Amino acid sequence: MTHFVFPPAALTVLAVSGGGLFPVRRIFCVGQNYADHTREMGGDPSREPPFFFAKPTDAVTSAPTVPYPPATQRLDYEGELVVAIGTGGAGIAPAEAEAHIYGYAAGCDLTRRDLQAEARKIGRPWDMAKGFDASAAIGVLMPADEVGHPGKGAITLSVNGMEKQRSDLSCMIWSVPEIIATLSSYVTLAPGDLIFSGTPAGIGPLFKGDRVDIRINGVAAHVFTVV
């Protein structure tokens, strides 16, 4: 009789506004998708094809506290709109992309910035800078059937009540439908996939005790404290 050699990991889920749980399959992240942040990182904000990196599924946390990770002296916040895929597909056209979206959430792409800078300098992958435990802090998922598809409106992140990031969703270099179209040309998207859609300028460090508050037009706020 076939059996597991040890108990399988618990399913990663996000709470859905109004009830229910969204099972998470994969996490994709778009790099430098706001012109001001691209300049902040020393890049060219022209519309070159978007690039992607990934986080492991179990990096997701919706807990009110997030542990400060080991092996870094510079933990940075990056407030982002998170897109949840409800219907899979490959080669999705931009005009059809919204039909594949289940909903949206506010999220924070936590980053070991010192490790990322070192990896960039020597041309190595970013995995340990981006894919560590609890590095994908995400709030309650809002179904698109209820909130529509936010293509414009404020996105802000505050630390200890002081605003650090502010932009508008319309300032994305690549819109959410364009992101989905491009990503689905590389991989077949599936229900449960999440996409972090990029962060505005104003990234900066977090310390133990900091309270992070992410607010996005039409989406439930997400608040957590670094411990």
Image (spheres, rainbow, N blue to C red):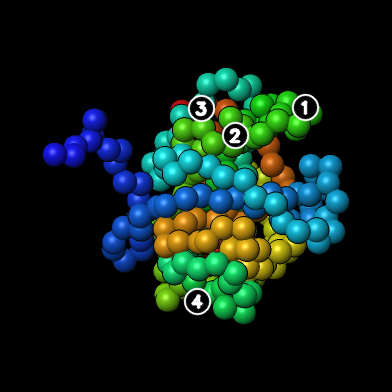
Query: Viewer-proximal residue, 12 or 2?
Result: 2
Q: Residue at x 76, y 59 (%)?
A: 49
Q: Earlier in the sequence, mark 2 or mark 3?
A: 3
| Kind of residue at disc 4 | Ala
| Kind of residue at disc 2 | Asp
Question: From the image, which quarter does the N terminus lie in?
Answer: top left
| Kind of residue at disc 3 | Tyr
> Residue 103, how many percent across, how many down?
46, 66
Q: Nearer the viewer, mark 1 or mark 3?
A: 1
**Crowdedness near tag 2: few (<14), some (14–19) or many (≥20) residues, C-alpha within 10 Å:** some
Q: What is the C-alpha distance between the residues marked 4 and 1?
A: 40 Å
Q: Earlier in the sequence, mark 2 or mark 1?
A: 1
Q: What is the C-alpha distance between the residues marked 3 and 4?
A: 37 Å
**Does the rendering let one see residue 158?**
no
> Residue 76, how many percent across, how many down?
63, 35
Q: Earlier in the sequence, mark 2 or mark 4?
A: 4
Q: Is residue 25 above or below residue 92?
A: above
Q: Which mark is residue 99?
A: 4
Q: Which residue is mark 1?
A: 122
Q: Which residue is mark 3?
A: 68
